[in-house]
Amino acid sequence: MEYASGLPRQLVSMKKNLFDQGYLDEQFYQLEELQDESSPNFVEEVVTLFFRDSSRLVANIDQALKKYPQDFCRLDNFMHQLKGSASRCLRSFQKVKKEHAVLKQKLENYFQVGPVDKATRSGN
């Protein structure tokens, strides 16, 4: 029973760290507001869909940079889909790619700890 009672505290701490490190922002709270009894895993499902789609786009961009370095229209299209802008250089893309992987791992760890509950929200 001690494990179960420490779970909400651990979730609050993990979430606070994700906010403090800049991995999460107010949009995460907005997602949590949409979660209810009828869709108790809503936030996790949205995050999973985001990573499924964004992982595909990151792979497409990576492939386009390696396979078609002169095809800037194709690369621009992929970058636009991922970031909303294609004005970043290769170094910026590598940073986004690394941050994407780190964020994915952190949120996977977060969701493995237990179900997301609005009651575990810190700062509110």
Image (tube, grey):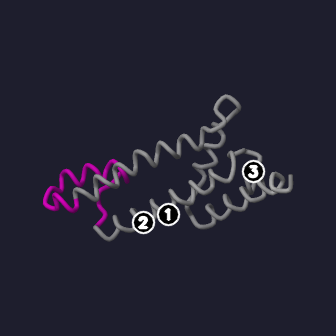
User: Is residue 77 found inside the magenta-colored segment of the image?
Assistant: yes
Labels 1 and 3: the sequence-earlier one: 1
Magenta part of the protein: which range? 65-89
Cα separation, mark 2 vs mark 1, equals 6 Å
Q: How many marks?
A: 3
Q: What secondary structure is found at the residue carrying circle 1?
A: helix
Q: Residue at x 64, y 32 (%)?
A: 39
The answer to whether residue 89 is left or right of residue 45 is left
Amino acid of disc 2: Lys
Q: CA distance from mark 3 to mark 2?
A: 28 Å
Category of crowding for the residue at label 1, using alpha-carbon neighbours closer than 10 angstroms: few (below 14), some (14–19), many (at least 20): few
- Whether residue 70 sits left or right of residue 106 in the image: it is left
Q: Residue furthest left?
A: 70
Determine which residue is flagged by label 2: 98
Residue receiving disc 1: 102
Q: Helix or strand or loop: what does disc 3 sit on?
A: helix
Measure the alpha-carbon separation of dots 1 and 3. 23 Å
In this view, 30 is above or below 104: above
Q: x, y (%) of residue 96?
A: 40, 63
Q: Quadrant of residue 62?
A: bottom left
102 relative position to 11: left or right: left
Label 3: which residue? Answer: 120
